[in-house]
Image: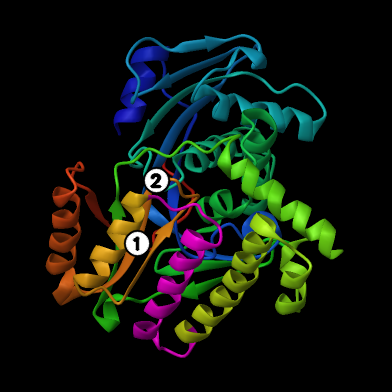
Amino acid sequence: MRVVEAFRAAFGADPRTVWHAPGRVNLIGEHTDYNDGFVLPFAVPWGVTAAVTPRGDHTVRLLSLQSDGEPITIEQHQDARGWTRYVVGVLAMLADRLGEPVPGADIAIDGDVPQGAGLSSSAALEVAVACALNDLHGLGMTPMELALLSQRAENDFVGMPCGIMDQAASALGEEGHALFLDCRSLGSRTIPLDLASHGLRILIVDTGVHHEHAGGEYAKRRAECESAARKLGVEALRDVTDLAGALELLQGDERKRTMHVVTENHRVEALIGLLRAGAVTEIGALLNASHLSLRDQYEVSSPELDVAVEAALRGGARGARMTGGGFGGSAIALVAEDRLDSVQESVAAAYAERGWRAPRFLPAVPSPGARRRA
């Protein structure tokens, strides 16, 4: 394992433990997690592997195989910068949870989540490190507790106001299944997602457009939802039961955000119903409706995402939508196996016509969640 070899070369010994945590793709349920709503992600084959050994002091030494140079030494948590904030944030939140300082660590990181594709490499990094520390220190934290700790690292330390979906999918994912998560109760259950038996695939279209929404448009959407909920007298938009009545009380962007969140929650439940009924081939219409709502009501799509979705449908996809936080990243398409080539050709041609860089196509296979590798 190359992360172990890199750890040995950098730190002069073998790591005490090695954990892998995957990224995720969201089948449906976008921007509902921080509105206490429903989501249906699944873990993907790519992720982050963390090789870790505790230290006798509070220094953190970090090596990333995706970054050139020597290990980065961090003496104080506030000195963390860039990608190191996600790792040091987990250590800081663990200390806060335990009410006492935690030992430092030597950590080597290796990742293969496509960067900027909206597949949550940050959550994979956080969860891999959290799982390794939980293992090293014998803390006995559950996968959901580790997901929550990782989310806090991103919220409170990095400053990204994300919901729990990404970290939960990484920590709790199960091979061949999607994860239904109620983001208020944190109740979850796995939903079989056997696409192959129906001759279908989920194809990820990586637009190549890097999305940066920490503290910007993403935070603005969350604030708009919270403001709308206050005006409606509910704890979160998930609690809106009379959508027509609610929309009469709201204006502008808050009205549009509310419409998306409420209808998106309904789409999650409807899609699960179709999966349980074995009607996998029928879920495409819900994916299409989700994209239109994200584009027009939540306004988080981009020209590259819209073109990818429209071209995939022209090429024969049964349904398609943007996935992830938006403003770039990836789209997903539900495609019959005999239409994979035509869908890819259609999207590639649409990009070429506009002079855009060719997109990357990745198969989205529901994969295992976080697990120990050594």
Position in image of residue 61 (x %, y %): 51, 15
Mark number displayed over residue 332: 1
Residue under label 2, please give it: 328
Position in image of residue 233 (x %, y %): 87, 64
> Quick one: quadrant of the C terminus?
top left
Kind of residue at disc 1: Ile
Q: Is residue 230 magenta?
A: no
User: Which residue is rendered at x = 43% and y = 48% of the image?
Assistant: 22
Name the colour scheme.
Answer: rainbow
Name the foreground residue: 177 vs 54: 177
Q: Secondary structure at mark 2?
A: loop
Position in image of residue 11 (x %, y %): 42, 13
Residue 58 seen by the camera = no
User: Which residue is rendered at x = 66% and y = 37% of the image?
Assistant: 155
Range of residues picked out in magenta: 276-302
Residue 124 seen by the camera = yes
Q: Secondary structure at mark 1?
A: strand
